[in-house]
Amino acid sequence: MIEIPKMSYGIDVASYQSTNLASYIVNGTKYAIVKVTQGTNYINPNAQSQISSSKTQGLMTMGYFYGTFSGNSSVAISEANYAVKYAKAYGIPKGSYFAVDWESGSGNYTEGSTLANTNAIIEAMKVIKQSGYQPLLYSGEAVLNYHVDIHKIIKAFGNCLWVAKYATMDRVDIPDFTWFPSMDGVAIWQFTQNWKGLNVDGNINVLPLKSESNNLSDSREDDWELTLHPIVKWDVPRVFIVSNLKGCNLYSDSDLAKVIGHLDRKSSYKVLDEKDGALKLGKNQWVDGRAGVTKSNPIFYNSNLSGRVKVVLDHTHALASPDADATKVYALETNKIYHITGRKGRFFALTDKYKGKTVWVTGNRAYVVL
């Protein structure tokens, strides 16, 4: 089980966005919704790479197809079957979410019979559910309110609406909830088309998102939980964790042609570079990024972020200041996780449990929990 807590940020991507989703991790996204198909004759050329990158980055990976079936149930079934065929082929994890994007444009007519529209959408969502995914319905607030019977859809599939409503067409970093689409059944709100100036749609889930399966089909549940929250030193920007059951090969270059070694499952390594899906772990040492999970360390990029650290060495103390020769205030428990409020160099700021003031712990003895 993978669970994303409510009020988490997510992105949705299509052919307009990069195949490498790493830059969005730094900005705090927790899930990615990838466009897979449109109608029955279009496949997003970036879909497979975007799905792979999302999974490699440790995001909850979801998908959607753009519907052009209007109010035609038989066409809706055909388009949904076409979509889930490629969702499976390209690696959208079973048990994750898959949405019907039903909006005005690109041949999709929304102003017909509300009953026909609703029935066609339901047929498409049935195909998605029968294929092992959790169905969502995406559209704008006005379309859903005036051209779809959302209560009939909610009755069939629960809180399944992914609703678009923007306060402005300009850049938005944080959603303004005075513009929230106050309607029944909303699970995800798409609040901007330009999140943080990244030219990508920004979403926030107002309900927890739960996926019954892992991103990596060859990993067991407990191992996925392990890779969700690895620990790294403060100066490691990105880490790769081997998750394949049999480990993975180590290659001499990014072409992944010459095997020079083998890495054990669950072992982790600092990522130095990436090229065409291959990850550089050392001089003339590369791995196939699909063999594991990579996680970025946001605290490396932003020293003002709060987070968590785990004390990994015995006899570690809270310090009075962020200095190597600082006075020891009190002992910290080994293997315990502490909340931090920021970083100064290699030192993490903690709140004094006795006096409420700031104390510090060195990043050489406490590692970041990702």
Image (spheres, helix red, strand yellow):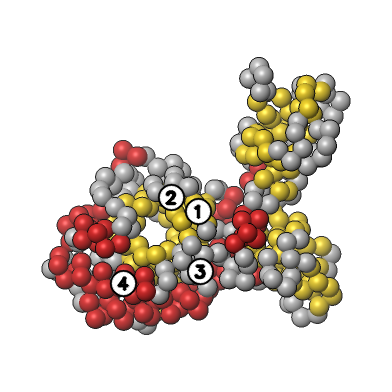
Q: What element carries label 2?
A: loop
User: In the image, residue 279 lies at what x, y percent?
Assistant: 71, 66
Q: Which of marks 3 and 4 is nearer the N terminus?
A: 3
- For label 3, the crowd category at 10 Å Cα-Cα, with few meaning under 14, some 14 to 19 and many 20 or more, is many
Q: Can residue 295 be seen in this view?
A: no
Q: Which mark is residue 208?
A: 2
Residue extending farthest to the right is 325
Q: Do the residues labelled 3 and 4 touch (CB within 8 Å)?
A: no
Give how far apart the Cα atoms at labels 3 and 2 are. Answer: 18 Å
Q: Is mark 3 on a helix, strand or loop?
A: loop
Q: Which of 337 and 296 is in front in this view?
A: 337
Q: Residue 3 carries which label?
A: 1
Name which quarter of the figure residue 102 lies in: bottom left
Q: Do the residues labelled 4 and 1 touch (CB within 8 Å)?
A: no
User: In the image, residue 82 lies at what x, y percent?
Assistant: 38, 80
Q: What element carries label 4?
A: helix
Residue behind mark 3: 93
Q: From what the image shows, is residue 310 above or below residue 260?
A: above
Q: Which of 110 and 327 is in front in this view?
A: 327
Give how far apart the Cα atoms at labels 4 and 2 are. Answer: 22 Å
User: In the image, residue 255 lies at what x, y percent?
Assistant: 73, 77
Q: Which of marks 2 and 1 is nearer the N terminus?
A: 1
> What residue type is disc 2 on?
Pro
> What residue type is disc 4 on?
Lys
User: In the image, residue 200 lies at what x, y percent?
Assistant: 46, 56
Give how far apart the Cα atoms at labels 3 and 4 are. Answer: 18 Å
- For label 2, the crowd category at 10 Å Cα-Cα, with few meaning under 14, some 14 to 19 and many 20 or more, is few
Q: Which of marks 3 and 2 is nearer the N terminus?
A: 3
Q: From what the image shows, is residue 309 above or below residue 2?
A: above
Residue behind mark 4: 126
Residue under the image location 74 percent in, 70 percent down: 247
Q: What element carries label 1?
A: strand
